[in-house]
Image (spheres, grey):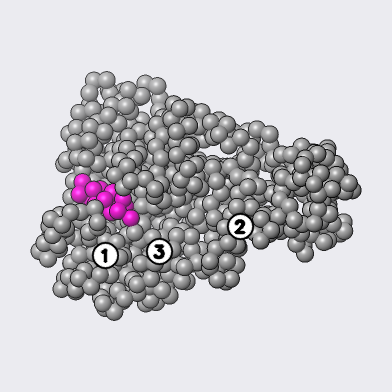
Amino acid sequence: MMERAAEILRDVYGYRRFRPLQAEAIDATLTGRDSLILMPTGGGKSLCYQIPALLADGVALVVSPLIALMQDQVSALDLLGVSAAYLNSSLDPSAQREVVDRLRAGQLKLLYIAPERLLQAGTLNLLADLEVSLIAIDEAHCVSQWGHDFRQDYLGLNVLRDRFPGVPRMALTATADVRTRAEIVERLELAAPREFIGSFDRPNIRYTVQARGDARSQLRRFLAERRDEAGIVYCMTRRKVETTADWLADEGFTALPYHAGLSSSMRAEHQRRFLREDGVVIVATIAFGMGIDKPDVRFVAHLDLPKSIEGYYQETGRAGRDGEPAEAWMVYGLQDVVRLRQMVDDSEADEQHKRIERGKLDALLGWCEVTACRRRSLLAHFGEQRETDCGNCDVCLFPPKTWDATVAAQKLLSCVYRTGQRFGAVHVIDVLVGKTTAKTAQHGHEALSTFGIGADFDTGKWRSVIRQLLVRGFLKVDVERYGALVLTPDSRPLLRGEIELNLREDAAKPKRSRPSRRDATVAAGDQALWQALRECRKRIADENGVPPYVVFHDSTLLDMLDRRPATPAELLAVSGVGQTKLERYGEHFLAVLNAPAAAADPSASTANENPES
């Protein structure tokens, strides 16, 4: 059976070898086993259920939480010649009846469906009369009530075990720590599942975290050489999304807002442009991104801190799905620390849930302040140990300086104590630097022994100290006192001089080294052919009403550029070119490749890989 799976991989998808764990996961499903599959974004999870679906009799059910993902994958499968459809609210009644008729007629190999639709009595009764080959539950971390993206509808999916006895079920996700994995198995009632845990490492993504100064100026510098690149900028609030998108548009970028407060038609149009046009930047809340398969997102920028490492990892994982260099860039500051901790404390969740959320936030804050390889620390959070530094994060490239902050911390903690632990960072810093204000005069704080003892540091330096003391647990924010800074028990040995404290030194203007892109290294003599291949792909995509990457990924076009195939047989050897796409598009691309202007000597090539699925 696995020989046949390898043939499908080659003939349908155009790849010559499986990526890590794909073959094992496919074999487990074909032998009737439940499975839990954790692979990073772009790691090829979809092949793990698509290939068994093509090998088995009946229809495979793919549970997905987002319409965008369903539409994208069905469009891609259609171009591969695979019969697939989706059932969701985007279809009008007649289109839904057509899908049901195709189901009953046995004409579909894969059906994508949302959990709430699947669990309706009518849907379950319909499927009970059909031969279901497997059930794939995508984004399975949504079942975890302690996770970063809980979805209530996922909790009912455990009924599938009893409604479809003997049908193998597959839970797939790119983001789940050890606790979340166990909860997925428990809540979905997977039967002794095989677990396939891939590496969390995305070596092509460069991670950079900066202390926030003038955020817009920092973002402007980051984007200075990225005007032709697709990217996502995440903001915390809808208002900030809109003002940032407007500002970027004024700066000359094609920037579009995306958040839940916009009309569904506007969200759909902005998403369509992001998927199909080059160089579009989406400015969004976290409402945007899950299920977006666009492979050539070159950067993900955060102007506000996410709530957890899991959320951050998933959001940044939308960059560089094609394996080409990409960047995850973030700025954060004291305000983020205070706001997010207040959000946890103000929530209506029970104390156990709050404790877990505080732990997740603390883990993220600690990661932001690391002074050793950022990637090693990120992987360690997910239980994966890396023996060497990555050389592709801000800490490795530009090791941060540290300084002995023991005395400075003692001054600040003393000032917090002597002002009564009743004030926020702004007033405490005013007292430290000796700034006379209405509030210092009102409370008599100009007479305190700590007034002016920190005049040797500016406000920015003191904000950095407070931020890091909050992260380290020497200070906390008291919500009931309107965000007042309060000492913790851990501050006592520091105040008494029993321990020393070294803190990161925030760079005034962090150095940058942009990772090189593969298409940027295309030889000057090949640029015309490279652009011609891209234009051919765009023309075909527009004719079929799909994003260009659904026709071929950049990696496939680059392989064409390297190999310079002259015949259909040679084109079939290109990574990502299967039999169906060869028959549909082969002559168009061969015409471009064999045009007189493309007659340069072919470059040496390497064996095909499976860069994406």
User: 10 Å neighbourhood of mark 3: few (<14), some, or many (≥20)?
Assistant: some
Using the image as rendered, state which of residue 244 and residue 14 is in the foreground: 244
What amino acid is labelled 3 in the image?
Answer: Arg
Residue at figure coordinates x 38%, y 71% from the top left: 155
Using the image as rendered, state which of residue 436 and residue 583 is in the foreground: 436
**Is label 3 in contact with label 1 (beta carbons under 8 Å)?**
no
Q: Nearer the viewer, mark 2 or mark 3?
A: 2
What amino acid is labelled 1 in the image?
Answer: Arg
Quarter of the image for the N terminus: give it. Answer: bottom left
Q: Residue 172, image x and y in percent?
A: 38, 62
Residue at figure coordinates x 33%, y 28% from the top left: 530
Using the image as rendered, state which of residue 393 and residue 361 is in the foreground: 361
What segment carries the magenta color? 66-79
Q: Residue 62, image x and y in percent?
A: 28, 62
Q: Earlier in the sequence, mark 3 or mark 1?
A: 1
Q: Residue 566, image x and y in percent?
A: 23, 31
Instruction: Say above or below: 279 vs 200.
Output: above
Q: Earlier in the sequence, mark 1 or mark 2?
A: 1
Residue 206 appears left or right of 318: right
Of helix, strand and loop, which one carries label 3? loop
**Is label 2 in contact with label 3 (beta carbons under 8 Å)?**
no
Of helix, strand and loop, which one carries label 1? helix
Q: CA distance from mark 3 to mark 1?
A: 14 Å
Residue at figure coordinates x 48%, y 37% from the top left: 244
Q: CA distance from mark 2 to mark 3?
A: 23 Å
Asked if residue 282 can be seen in this view, the reply is yes
Query: Where residue 39 is drawn, which disc sits there?
Result: none
Query: Where residue 151 is drawn, which disc sits there?
Result: 3
Q: Which residue is mark 2?
A: 342
Of helix, strand and loop, which one carries label 2? helix
Q: Which residue is mark 1?
A: 117
